[in-house]
Each structure stands twice: as structure tokens, then as C-alpha cells.
Amino acid sequence: MVLLLLGALVSVAESQSGGNFLGSKRKVSSASVQAELNGVLGEVLGQGHGLTNERLFKIHRTLDPMFRSLPKNNQGHISSAVMRYAVRRYFSQSHGWIVKGFNTHEEVANISSTTDTAILQDKLPSYIRSILEERFALDGFSLDGVVAMVASLERLVFDEVVRGVELAFHLNSLDLSQRLSMDDLNEVLSSFLITELLEGYDGPEKHRQLRNNIRQFYPHWDTTLLFLKDGVGSDCFQRQASSNPFRDRLYSFEDAVRMAQQVSDDFGSWSNHECHEMKEMLMEVDVHSTGRVKLSDFYGYSKDGAWQFLEPSEQLRRAGVLDESSMVAGPQVMIPNYINSMSNCITSTPYYSICCLNECDQVFQQLEAKIATPTATPSEIIRALEAPWHYSVASISGVHRERLDEIARVSNGKIPLHGRLLNRWLHFVYPQECPYPHAAGVVKAMTPKQWADLVGIDAESATQDEIAQHTESSYAKQAPLPDAGVLQWNLEESLLESSTASDKVGSPLWGVLRIAAQIGMLVSFVSFLKPLVGMLRSTASNKPLEYDV
């Protein structure tokens, strides 16, 4: 039920803003979004979600162990900063997405108080985040509150899928009510993938040109077609009991939306094989498994005709990829930081970028499942990592154990699971999987397009002169150091802010104020409910199809 209501939020906002599904920069009404969100989420949260929808169960099940281990306020809720971390982790490990407005290194701005009458589509995740953060600023987010945030964002993505399938029908000269053959369905899904996930739409003629030359722009297209066909085949197999075995199967617009939704959900995880290929290439020259590759070796791949590893050193530096701590070793590329940098995001949709999966999330999932508290002793952390899984505990050497004890001493015996110190320790234990955690403000994350816009097309890749400068330097002639990166170890901690406003007030008057605030919210909810029902009825009468996810 909640997702249908959230779908109404988006569809009503779009209908009021006059959005055209062929437009690349749609705007939505900020007033209608806020009114709908206040009413819909007020009802949903007031009922504890119900969690009757299969997708909500999935979100809840994924977030539950993480939520248990996150730092909380006095009421057992999490702050806005911690919520953003949880949402970021959820989408990264589930889909390989970095949702706009939730990126680690982007500045978090409060835009819910904007007086603009409309807001650009790609700002909508930030807008909804800001509204909910204001709603929960006092007491913090419960687990259901975080589920509501994730469900809201997933619903936005689903609405964009519907729009993308409509566009794909249009580009293939098909009517939305038309029944599709298998060939037509594959053409629609191919167009959907190109326009929505590979950013290949700038008008029908441009789309046709790109489809004809797609392999030049996207070398993995043939394997991607296999991914699409496997998805269609899996969907057909699951529904074969309800189909007529004596008639060729025809597919509806709703069938195409359902399959496109699965493509959208799975494409990030499936396409991660490209990230593995890059990682394996870099690991070949990481002879001491330090997670570091000399910049000269990094650029050395371009001599063999590789199309990867051509970012200029300044771009790598801004992205937090370079380890320049040693004057002896020279500049080195940190493998996990490079793989997980924005320069390796495969593509960007209006609401998220598809990026490499952070393998260190698997380490944290293991720790969270086994420990289930915000802090732990060194022995508890070691035992959690000794549980059977694919990373060997043999790599936790005596030096690593001594460092873990050092962290415990500066943390009063209990190590925060989500602090920078444990992240730094994990980087040295699993240097090829866990990124080095930089201090706030060091990393200036930029997509390839943002970098190109900054420096110009001619300077977006390393020049032959820059490559020669590094491959012919004195550092290039040195053998890789077995202790590369050791100078980056330090005991500087940084924790997520876990307290909320309710932690700072404890007087009896505060209880009275809270009750008054709750009554005010109830009155506000009732005032929003009447126009909400009218809007939903209006939407239902004008929209013949409703979709669930």
C-alpha cells in the first residue's frame, strides 16, 4: 500500500507541473511534493508501516542488522547523519547505486525550505531527504523511519522506470496499449536500457544513431544483451503456469514495466564485472598486496592500448585515490579508492549513479551481523571476522592485532564499528577491498562529466606528456615497497554525529512541549489528509493503470 501511495505523490506532482515524459530536465511542484509527503508518510508512519508489501519486507530485512549496530540517541533512534550513512550503504550493497543527495563527499544542503514553486527532477531525492530530516530532527529516525526513506527513494526510481518504458515504446513507434512479440519486447527493453541507464537519448534520431553504433560507445553491449534476454527468460519462466502453452506469448506495457524494473534493480550488480576486470589488472602489479600501485605502473597499461587508467593525476588526487605520503615511494594509486571513485561510475540516471560495488560493505555486513551493537572490543571484532566467509582471517597479522588494541586504548576499550579508525584499520587488513578513509573535505568527488566540464574535453584524460613524465620518472625504476602506505596509519578518529535535539533537553517542560508538538503534527496531518484524498481520487479517475513494485 505504501508504495502505491508514494507513487501517487510523484504522479500528482508531475501532473501539476505539466511534466512531459520526453523532457530531459523535468520540474516538479515543491508545494505538492511537500503536502503529499506530509500526508502520506504521516499515515504510513502512524501505522508503523504495516510492512505488508514484499519489497518493504526486503528493505526492512536488509536494514535491520545494520540498524542494530549503528550509533543511536537516547531513544534508540539514529540521527540524520547516521540515516544518510545507512541509506547510502543500502543502495550501494543492494544495487550498486549512489543516490543523488546521499553521496559521502557531497555537501549536504537543506533545501526543503526553498520558496521556489518547482524543483528540478534530479534534486528530488535531496528534497525528500531534507523534508524527512526536518520531520525527524527532534527524536531521530527509527528503523521504520529509515525504511520509509528508502521506500520513498525506490518509488521515485520506479516512477522513472515507467516513464522510461513509455519513452522506449515511443522510440520504437509502439502504442502503449499494443501487445508485444518477444522481438518487440527486446527492442523496447534495449531502448530503455540505452536511454535510462546509458544516457543515450537526445531525440529519436540521436537514439537511432546510438543504437546503430552502440558497441563503439559501450564495448560490453553484446554481453548486456545477454543480460536482458536472461532477465526476460527468467520472468517468463516464473509466469509460465499462467500462460497459454498453445499460443505465442504476447507482452503488455505492464509486463515491460515489470521487466524494466528488474533490469534497473539488477544492472548495477550485474555490470560490476567491469569493476572486477579493472581490479584484477591493478592487482597484477600489486606484488606485495598493499592495495597500492605505482602511478607509473597505473599509466603503463595505456602503452598496451588499454582504454582504462587514463585519468590525469590531478583528477586522481581530488578523488582521494593517490597515496602521496612517502617521498621514497612516490605517488601511488590506492586500488579500492580508485575502483570506488566516481570516475568509474558506469552511468547516471536522474536519481542515482551506477557505480562499482564497495567490497568492504561485505566486511561490515559480517561485523554487523555477528556483533549487533555500535561498539565492540578487539576480541569481539577478531571473532566476528573469523566466522566463515571468503576473506581469510589469516591476513589479520600480529601487527594488525596490535593496531586494533591501540584503537581500543584511545576509545576507552570499546571500538566504534562505524568510526574512521576502524575503517582505516580495515583498509590495512584488506587493502585491496576496503578504501582508505580520508578526513572530511579531502575528497572532491566528481563524475567524468563534471571533470570534463571543469577542465574541458581536451584535458579530461592524461596527456602523453604526463604519462611519459611518470613512466620515465625515478620512482618508476624502483621496485614496489612491501610496506607501502605505512605512513598513512594514524590514530585520528572521526565519528558519525549520533545525538539529536531530544538528547539535549530533559526538563518536565520538555515533555509538555513534545505533547504540544505531537498535537500540532496531528492537526497538520488532518489538514493535509482531505486534499490528499481528493488528489488521489482525481489521479485514480484520470489514470487507468496503477503499478506496484
Image (spheres, grey):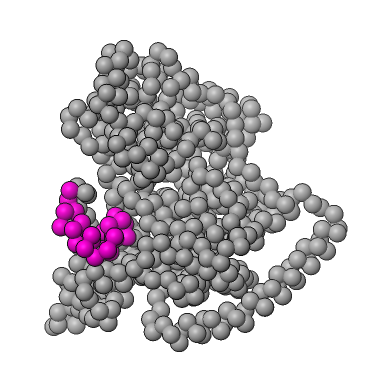
Q: Is residue 233 left or right of residue 470?
A: left
Q: Is residue 200 covered in magenta? A: yes
**Residue plotted at (40% across, 20% down):** 484
Point out residue 468 in the picture as x, y percentages from the top left corner.
26, 21
Q: Is residue 464 left or right of residue 93?
A: left
Up/down of 347 relative to 236, above or below: above
How many labels were placed on the picture?
A: 0
The front one of 397 and 284 is 284
The front one of 396 and 22 is 22
Q: Is residue 258 visible?
A: no
Please tell me in which quadrant of the rendered image residue 75 appears. bottom right
**Residue plotted at (53% across, 81% down):** 535
Q: Is residue 456 visible?
A: yes
**Residue plotted at (48% across, 35% down):** 443
Bounds of the magenta segment? 192-216
**Residue plotted at (59% across, 48% down):** 81
Please tell me in which quadrant of the rendered image residue 322 appears. top left
- Outermost residue, bottom direction? 541
Point out residue 503 in the picture as x, y percentages from the top left corner.
74, 50
Q: Is residue 73 left or right of residue 393?
A: right
Q: Main secondary structure of the magenta part?
A: helix
Point out residue 118 in the picture as x, y percentages from the top left corner.
52, 65
